[in-house]
Amino acid sequence: MSAVLSSPILIQYALCLASAVFYVSGTAAMKLYGDLPFGLLMVPVGAAFILAAWFEVAVLRTARVGQVFLLIFAFEVTLTSLLAFVVLNERYSTRELIGLATIIAGIALMVPGRGADFALREATAVAAVPPAAANTEFPASTDSPFHGQDYIPPSQGETAWPRT
């Protein structure tokens, strides 16, 4: 059980969820206490957003930026919708509920496991290398401004541009 709880993926998901919780708490503070003077309101809102950014930076050190953005956004939408329904007593139309269910399904698709990973690998493999093009050589383009220059991988601190 401790191996599961210390899994890097689970830690990344927990950091994304923590970031989303603080983003939503800042938004909730603006909604619930919006009649307070600006200076008083910005203290809890600013603290919540700073903590949200801190958790986001922590997860970005080890995870892909696209996945982090999507997870935090999906968690935010889900948590904000629950907050609006439970605390603010807002109601949703059928269309809005279908949209929310689609977002929750997106979170489920990103959950690690054999099913999601296998499907992603298969889709990527098919999209990346069509069978007909697998052994095809493509001539170099002469339209490129770097035509004829050798590409040398960058070392630490350099850009990826070809050296002349």
Image (spheres, rainbow, N blue to C red):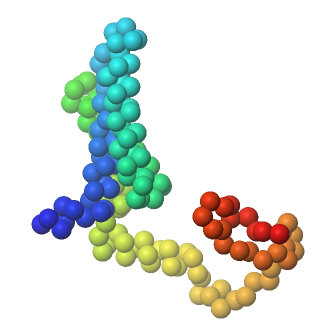
In which image quadrant can residue 159 be found?
bottom right
Q: Residue furthest left?
A: 1
Q: Position of residue 110 (x, y in %)?
A: 36, 61
Residue 103 visible in the snapshot: no
- Residue 18: image quadrant is top left
Task: Work out which quarter of the rendered image holds the C terminus and state it.
Answer: bottom right
Above or below, 146 against 25 in this view is: below
The residue that appears at 65% across and 86% down in the rendered structure is: 133
Horizontal side of 88 relative to 131 (left or right) equals: left
Total marks shown come to 0
Q: Going by the image, does 154 lie left or right of 126?
A: right
Q: Residue 85: x percent and y percent? A: 25, 31
Q: Quadrant of residue 87?
A: top left
Q: Nearer the viewer, residue 71 or 130?
A: 71
Residue pictured at 25% horizontal, 24% vertical: 88
| Residue in the picture at 36% in, 38% down | 52
The residue that appears at 32% across and 56% down in the rendered structure is 12
Q: Position of residue 50 (x, y in %)?
A: 38, 33
**Up-down relation of residue 119 to residue 88 (above or below):** below
Position of residue 22 relative to residue 120, above or below, is: above
Judge by depth and name the residue closer to the eye, 10 or 58.
58
Query: Residue 162 in the image: x percent, y percent?
Result: 76, 68
Can see residue 9?
yes
Extreme residue in the bottom direction: 135
Q: Quadrant of the N terminus?
A: bottom left
